[in-house]
Amino acid sequence: MASEHPTLAEYLATWSGDDPVREAVNHTIAALAAASVELAALIAEGPFVRGLGETIGDAGGGDVKKFLDVESHKLFKSALERAPVAAMGSEEADSAEFLSEEAQLVVAIDPLDGSSNIDTNVSIGTIFSVLPVPEGMDADAALLQAGREQLASGFIVYGPQATLVVSVRDGTHIFTLDPAERVYRLTRKNISIAANKAEYAINASNERHWPEAVRAYIEDLKAGKQGPRQLDFNMRWVGSLVAEAYRIMIRGGIFLYPGDARKGYEQGRLRLVYEAIPLALLVSEAGGSATDGITPILDIKPESLHQRVSLVFGPPAEVERIAQYYEARPGDGKSPLFSDRGLLRG
Ligand code: FDP
């Protein structure tokens, strides 16, 4: 088993060698992975843990805070306190938390993604991004660098198996938790997002709020063989970003969570720093693209930790096709072109 499926530790040790920055990235990913093994065990206990999916407060912006959100945050924070990490930005905290002053890395993390699925026994996850602290830059500012600066990113899906999808910018790889030994083992190397899967993921209940570009694009997919695509498309919506992303990594398809006309959703629902940026690196290392509809996510410099963004990802040709829908309908006022770049604003 060991040679066919090297452990995450073996894989990262070979990758890092004696390079000090790589060694720091290696130790940081190892710390995150170890915490995720503990979290996977807690999630698996489900109803035996009192109040696992209980709502315990308001996370702002229409989101609720659950017991497991808070526990996950604590677990990853304590793991990162023992890693070479100067500061951590967490979806569960208002501002950056400072850890080891001298360290040269920062980590942005969504400790528990898809928390509305906790009680339903559906996959949930953790998403993380590892960034350098450039000379002369404060650690909290380092968390707001554009996604192109990432040294590594990954997500864990707590599903039928616990799986870690990770990139240290040498491709995107999948490690699966070996439950007997409580270690992640490499199960798929260098994944490549399939180009031609006729499957899309979008929360269709928001259709009436969508910008015209998205409505027109989805209409064309729904028209199937009789429509302009001359192909029947299938739809999937799990409601956990990690599960949609994992499916797309494995078999292709396209994901959209566009900004829409609802109050607070003008820039989308998903978080740029904690969700879109780490995912965009994994997608691009797997040969795909991720944009806000038009602009590559990796090119966007965040202005604040909790900033939201429209998110589209999948194979490059399909992502490009969606950009053409946005570009052809600049007058609808809700496309990223108009909300992000302010062309219609005073
Ligand atoms: P959740 O709020 O349950 O954590 O990150 C936010 C997220 O889930 C994503 O995982 C998921 O794709 C999306 O929100 C689901 O949003 P809708 O409820 O609007 O479908």
Image (tube, rainbow, N blue to C red):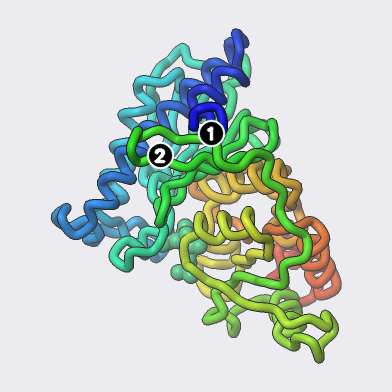
Q: What element carries label 2?
A: strand
Q: Which amino acid does label 1 sit on?
A: His
Q: Distance between the residues labelled 1 and 2?
A: 10 Å
Which mark sits nearer the N-terminus, 1 or 2?
Answer: 1
Which residue carries the number 1 mark? 5
Task: Name the residue located 14 percent from the left edge and 55 percent from the top edge.
Answer: 50
Residue furthest to the front in view is 1
Residue furthest to the bottom in view is 226
Residue 76 visible here: no
Name the spot of residue 134 as percent of width and height, x first. 62, 19
Task: Name the residue located 30 percent from the left edge and 59 percent from the top edge.
Answer: 58
Q: Which amino acid does label 2 sit on?
A: Asp
**Looking at this view, is 166 or 313 the one in front?**
166
Does residue 35 lie above or below 202 as drawn? above
Q: From the viewer's perspective, is 241 left or right of 122?
A: right
Density class for disc 2 (Cα within 10 Å; few <14, some 14-19, many ≥20) is: some
Q: From the viewer's perspective, is 319 left or right of 239?
A: right
Which residue carries the number 2 mark? 178
Q: In which quarter of the image is residue 129?
A: top right
